[in-house]
Image (cartoon, rainbow, N blue to C red):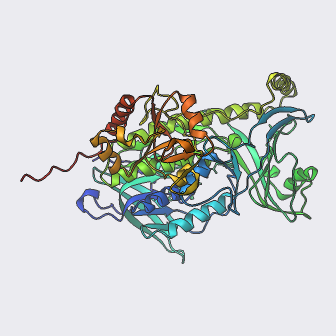
Amino acid sequence: MATTTPTTRRRTPAPPAVGADAHFDADVAVVGGGPVGTLLAVLLGRRGHRVTIVEKWPAFYEQPRAITFDHEIARILAILGIDSDNDPAIDYHNDIYYWKNAEGRTLLEVDWASTAASGWHTRYWFSQPALEKRLRGLAAELPGVSTRCGWQATGLQQDDDGVVLTGTVTSADGTVSTETLRAKYVVGADGANSFVRQALDLGFEDHGFFFDWLILDIIPNEPMPSEPTHWQLCDPARPTTIVPGGPSRRRWEFMVLPGENPAELASTESAWNLLEPWGATPENSVLERSAVYRFQARWASAWRNGRGLIAGDAAHLMPPFAGEGMCAGLRDSLALAWRLDLVLSGKAGEALLDSYGTERAGHVQHYINFSMDLGKIICITDPEEAAERDRRMITELEASDGTPVDTDIATLGPGLWIEGTAHAGELSVQGVVEANGRTGRFDDVVGRGWTIIGRGANPAALLTGEQRRLLDCLGGRCAGIGPADDHSDVVDVDGTYGTWFDALGAEFAILRPDFYVAATASTPEELRAHLNTILAGLRLPAPAPTAAK
Ligand SMILES: Cc1cc2nc3c(=O)[nH]c(=O)nc-3n(C[C@H](O)[C@H](O)[C@H](O)COP(=O)(O)OP(=O)(O)OC[C@H]3O[C@@H](n4cnc5c(N)ncnc54)[C@H](O)[C@@H]3O)c2cc1C
């Protein structure tokens, strides 16, 4: 029996053997009711799977943390019907993200003003508790999803059939008891100090980045416009971040300087002293939160052990300079949801779960390194080093063509995509299309999930009968995209796909349920060969034998 070792030393009753009883309380037990665990539960619940979320806090955790997400997350939230462009709880600002030195000279301009290739604005602003509540509400609507609050996972055992989770349960009247929960799989979305990660014996590599920052969230009594909207003050005397905090909120982040006492800096009096030069005072604002966080850079060396997996902060931590920590976790949720859906419904072999960790690890390491690189520039407190940095960055900015830089593109680690085909392993573009009398974003009009697109004619006719059967089994589709006069079934209204195919030098693309490109191809033969490789990687079942006459 492959057993994982609980880290707790408490005495708990011996859990029942997993395989002894065919009964499962849930298909998937998710440990942690944060954004990552809850999104995963909603995605699986919508596919008809039974999910139990266990969350150690009896009451909802109201404190703001993440405040910004990127275009890819807007695309993911749209699966749930959340429209980040028009949602009252989500903001966007058509403005550049500036980095300035202590004298106010611009060091860097980051393009947060334009629409990203995935069809959504580059950056959105929100309050994490508001989003979490929204996700919990969506989970509560699903008959197969239940959330157990006050349930702290303390033990985990697994065998070939499933897992048994043991928990310390605190009821509303304060009574403490021990319960067990049986599920086919367990996912640890239980944050930085993940119990599940430790119980599964998955290492957590430390990349040695430690800086303490004071985070101040305020709710102004009146609108408090900032010019620029979001910017970084690279002042060695006090590196500072000034950003929106979602609708009706602002955030300041102040670096804790060497020798300062973090607790003293976070006191209410000190917080208002720091905010006063910025025009925020107790008279015009409410201080919602003052807390010092230690920014770290860590990732798990493996993301799966048997029937146990990890996601979100349990699998990776990064300093928030790129605003990508939760984003990475929500990508994990989607990457895991479509795989678990296929495995649980018997459409794919369990080995498919291995590519979850290899792909996500490679992708998240890119963002962790990127965030650390930003931090190394921002967290300079030595005046001479800062002056040298400023000279270098100003020279680079003056030598540039004036176009604000775009944050670079991350590629999946090795997994279910074909290396060497253009754009494979990267997020697919999304344009405005028209089909069946509807005009809008591709995902809404054509659909989400496995999709094979071709320039012009629908590529379905180019596939073998077996490939069409397997695509059907996946709930996938084919679509031909072209200009209005091309008689394609999908009209490329804003020309996104024509431009994309030109840039790729390809005629076909195989898109996955997480919007990543599995492969591109320039001939029908290539398309069929690449599709066979992808389908083999999924290990879809063979057709049922036809009864002998
Ligand atoms: C100051 C700050 C600013 C940030 N800004 C951004 C940003 O702008 N953009 C961005 O993308 N990210 C940002 N992040 C990161 C983001 O907040 C996290 O990545 C995100 O909260 C991770 O979500 P999660 O669901 O993985 O984990 P968490 O939010 O930590 O949730 C884990 C849950 O598991 C529960 N739990 C833990 N152990 C157990 C157990 N044994 N049993 C049951 N339940 C358990 C916890 O109570 C918790 O509710 C920021 C973080 C900080 C600290």
Left or right: where does residue 248 sit relative to residue 318? right
Residue 54 visible to the viewer? yes
Q: Can residue 7 be seen in this view?
A: no
Q: x, y percentage for residue 96? A: 79, 41
Look at 90% across and 35% down and name the residue there.
102
Q: In which quarter of the image is residue 208?
A: top right
Closest to the observer: 87 or 548?
Answer: 548
Residue 350: image x %, image y %?
32, 45
- The residue closer to the viewer here, 402 or 90, is 402
- As displayed, is residue 337 above or below residue 483? below
Residue sitting farthest toward the front: 485
Of residues 445 and 541, the one nearer the viewer is 445
Which residue does the image show at 35% across and 37% down from the upper left?
Answer: 462
In the rendered view, tell whether residue 532 sits above or below residue 305.
above
Q: In this view, does 91 lie to the left or right of 317?
A: right
Of residue 414 and residue 280, the one placed in the foreground of this image is: 414
**How far from the left and from the top, in percent, is residue 104?**
91, 36
Name the residue at 46% across, 64% down: 168
